[in-house]
């Protein structure tokens, strides 16, 4: 089980020692540390820790322990001071910010349970959803509340799904109730804003988020108009994940989203793949989702790439030109995938 900054270590261990990991639990953690906050905020926090550790540890306690009594808050702050000096904490923050284990996620074979509180201020809720999205054999359970630590407050909501998950019969129960009932084939569109971290630094957080929010609304409208379904698991403010039953409709929607992004000054990476997915609480999981995300990451700004599977489905109905790019290696995917660049006819 990995929580907070220990999650990436648990993920790495599960990949390096797969024979020793039968099940993996991730609570309130992340795969990409630099998404926790902006670099400017990180540097400010590190500076505060090094220069005013007494004040900083109270501030950190408040972030991770939202809603606890003042007495408990003081206890947590004091425990932080007793357990580590300021330089150790500053280095921990710097190291956590530099962690990126996203490329390892598709390689994890063990059944994985991902838990995250909706109001978590230490690790944003979207980061837990993103973890589950990129794990091929994961179940994501959103939890109410804002308290980051699992052992304060409503611990029962954390303990119960963990105990169920560790039960030997969990796998068979989950398979019957989730996989068999909700699996099926889908056309999967993955769209991400190009270099969102750099744009945030250049435009400022408020300005970038306003642009991203406007684009998000436009893309969701486009997807609905083309009979697609937006997946809440990818509500990141800088991209969308959507599923379709028609490959031609997915391509039309992707091209329209790309134009909306260009018009709004936020170019998009766009990728489409088709395959079996597992649906759960308006989330989709599985290898096909991972491949779609990898295809998107290979696309140039504003470019739409699709897999050979999608091209075959839409070859006579999409009214576009497919340029064969040959077989491409995708990170974390064992077999190469033949890709096509899509241009309006």
Image (cartoon, grey):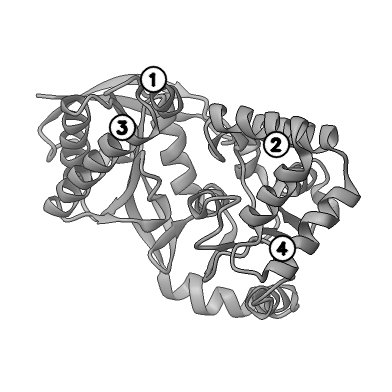
Using the image, determine if residue 140 lies above or below residue 126. below
Determine which of the numbered discs, if any, sits on residue 207 in the image: 3
Q: In this rendering, which labeled residue sits more in front, label 3 or label 4?
A: 4
Closer to us: 146 or 243? 146
Q: Residues within 10 Å of mark 1 (few under 14, many from 20)?
A: few
- State the residue position of label 2: 96
Q: Which label's residue is closer to the chain start, 2 or 3?
A: 2
Instruction: Give SS at disc 4.
Output: helix
- State the residue position of label 1: 202
Q: How many marks?
A: 4
Q: Residues within 10 Å of mark 3 (few under 14, many from 20)?
A: few
Q: Which label's residue is closer to the chain start, 4 or 2?
A: 4
Q: Which label's residue is closer to the chain start, 3 or 4?
A: 4
Where on the picture, by quarter, is residue 245? bottom left
Q: Residues within 10 Å of mark 4 (few under 14, many from 20)?
A: many
Please report contact status of discs 3 and 4: CB closer than 8 Å, yes or no.
no
- State the residue position of label 4: 73
Q: The N terminus appears in which quarter of the rendering?
A: bottom right
Q: Which label's residue is closer to the chain start, 4 or 1?
A: 4
Q: Position of residue 300 (x, y in %)?
A: 35, 19
């Amino acid at each position: 089980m990995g929580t907070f900054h220990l999650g990436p270590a648990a993920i790495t261990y599960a990949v390096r020692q797969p024979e020793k990991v039968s099940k993996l639990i991730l609570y309130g953690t992340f795969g990409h540390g630099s998404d926790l906050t902006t670099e400017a905020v990180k540097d400010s926090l590190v500076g505060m820790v090094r220069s005013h550790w007494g004040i900083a540890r109270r501030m950190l306690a408040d972030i991770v322990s939202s809603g606890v009594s003042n007495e408990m808050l003081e206890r947590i702050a004091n425990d932080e001071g007793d357990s580590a000096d300021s330089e150790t904490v500053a280095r921990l923050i710097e190291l956590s910010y530099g962690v990126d284990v996203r490329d390892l996620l598709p390689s994890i074979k063990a059944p994985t349970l991902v838990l995250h509180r909706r109001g978590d201020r230490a690790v944003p809720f979207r980061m837990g959803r993103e973890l589950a999205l990129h794990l091929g054999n994961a179940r994501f359970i959103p939890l109410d509340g804002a308290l980051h630590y699992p052992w304060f407050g409503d611990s029962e909501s954390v303990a119960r799904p963990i105990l169920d998950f560790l039960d030997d019969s969990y796998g068979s129960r989950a398979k019957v109730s989730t996989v068999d009932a909700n699996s099926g084939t889908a056309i999967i569109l993955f769209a991400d804003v190009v270099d969102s971290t750099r744009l945030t630094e250049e435009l400022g957080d408020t300005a970038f988020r306003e642009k991203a929010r406007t684009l998000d609304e436009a893309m969701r409208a486009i997807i609905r108009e083309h009979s697609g379904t937006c997946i809440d698991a990818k509500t990141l403010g800088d991209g969308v994940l959507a599923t379709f039953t028609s490959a031609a409709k997915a391509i039309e929607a992707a091209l329209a989203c790309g134009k909306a992004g260009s018009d709004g000054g936020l170019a998009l990476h766009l990728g489409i793949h088709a395959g079996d997915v597992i649906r759960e609480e308006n989330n989709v999981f599985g290898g096909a989702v991972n491949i779609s995300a990898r295809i998107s990451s290979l696309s140039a700004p504003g470019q739409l790439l699709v897999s050979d599977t999608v091209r075959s489905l839409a070859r006579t109905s999409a009214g576009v030109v497919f340029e064969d790019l040959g077989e491409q290696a995708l990170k974390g995917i064992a077999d190469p995938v033949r890709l096509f660049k899509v241009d309006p006819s």
